[in-house]
Amino acid sequence: MATPSASQPPLLRALGGSRLPALDGLRAVAVGVVMVYHFGINAVPGDLGVSAFFVLSGFLITWLLLKEHRATGGMSLRQFYTRRVLRIFPAYYAFIALTYAGDHVRGQAWPPGLAPSALVYLVNYFNALNGHPTTSIAHAWSLGIEEQFYLLWPLLLLVLLRGGVARVARALAVMVVAVVAWRCVLLFGLHVDRAYLYNAFDTRFDNLAVGCILATIAAAPRFQGIAGQLAIRCTCGTNGD
């Protein structure tokens, strides 16, 4: 991956590396919020941490795909999916196998449908359709949403980019509104169990889409210019000028 150039706008330089330490820090905060909530401190909004994690994921994946598109004029879906598989699949399937074996040794057999759902990253829909039962892998619902995002979003982004980045941003804004409206229909019109609203990809995609929108905004030259001016002013203020 190319090294950020000194001639680039400050925002592009900050986001131009292969690692984004600032996002790692925000991700750690989001995970920390969830962990504190699960330790029994209910005053801490655990779902807010999950939503923040989704926003960060949407931003990072979209930013990396847009950066590749700017540099090469296209996106290698093969390379993208290969990286995702190598990064996630080994640890995930090792966890599933060990958890499955451990539960059966303890006599805590998994309910019907859970194992197949886990194998294809559909724990979120197993939870959604079964009232979010307490299982040893119930928390894998969020990873299921991530994997569904990884599978679908690059394909859709390629199509949307034919109309330019502005078209991507507009389409994402429409999707956010559509998902919010869909949640309202499910909750107030169809009276669907809240477990579905919490776990399903179709009711949580707006979290990811917000991050995607932020990535398209950050990629816009006009926004980069504004960010550069703000950085200069902040630096001057810090130096007392």
Image (cartoon, rainbow, N blue to C red):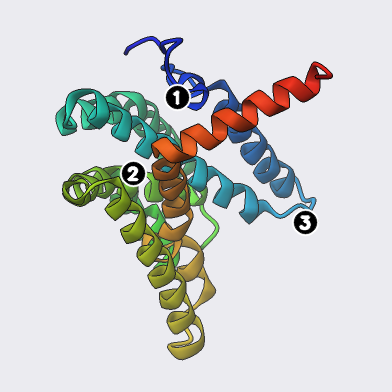
Callout 3: helix, strand or loop? loop
**Residue located at (58% from left, 47% from top):** 52
10 Å neighbourhood of mark 1: few (<14), some, or many (≥20)?
many
User: Upstream in the sequence, badge 3 or badge 1?
Assistant: 1
Mark 3 touches mark 1? (CB < 8 Å)? no
**Kind of residue at disc 3:** Asn
Callout 2: helix, strand or loop? helix
**Residue located at (71% from left, 21% from top):** 235
Q: Is residue 148 left or right of residue 129?
A: left
**Kind of residue at disc 2:** Glu
Of the pair 82 and 180, the residue shown nearer to us: 180
Of the pair 30 and 3, the residue shown nearer to us: 3
Callout 1: helix, strand or loop? helix
The residue under label 3 is 42
Among all residues in the image, which is located at the extreme right? 240
Mark nearest the camera among 2 and 1 is 1
The residue under label 1 is 12
Q: Is residue 232 left or right of residue 11?
A: right
Among all residues in the image, which is located at the extreme bottom? 189
**Residue located at (63% from left, 40% from top):** 30
**Kind of residue at disc 1:** Leu
Of the pair 52 and 215, the residue shown nearer to us: 215
Among all residues in the image, which is located at the extreme front? 241
- Across and down, in percent, residue 232 comes to 64, 24
Mark 2 touches mark 1? (CB < 8 Å)? no
Q: Is residue 9 left or right of residue 22?
A: left
The residue under label 2 is 147
User: Upstream in the sequence, badge 2 or badge 3?
Assistant: 3
**Image quadrant in which the N terminus is located:** top left
**Residue located at (36% from left, 39% from top):** 62
Q: Estimate the spatial distance between the alpha carbons at disc 2 and disc 1, rounded to whole Å.
A: 27 Å
**Which picture quadrant has residue 83?**
top left
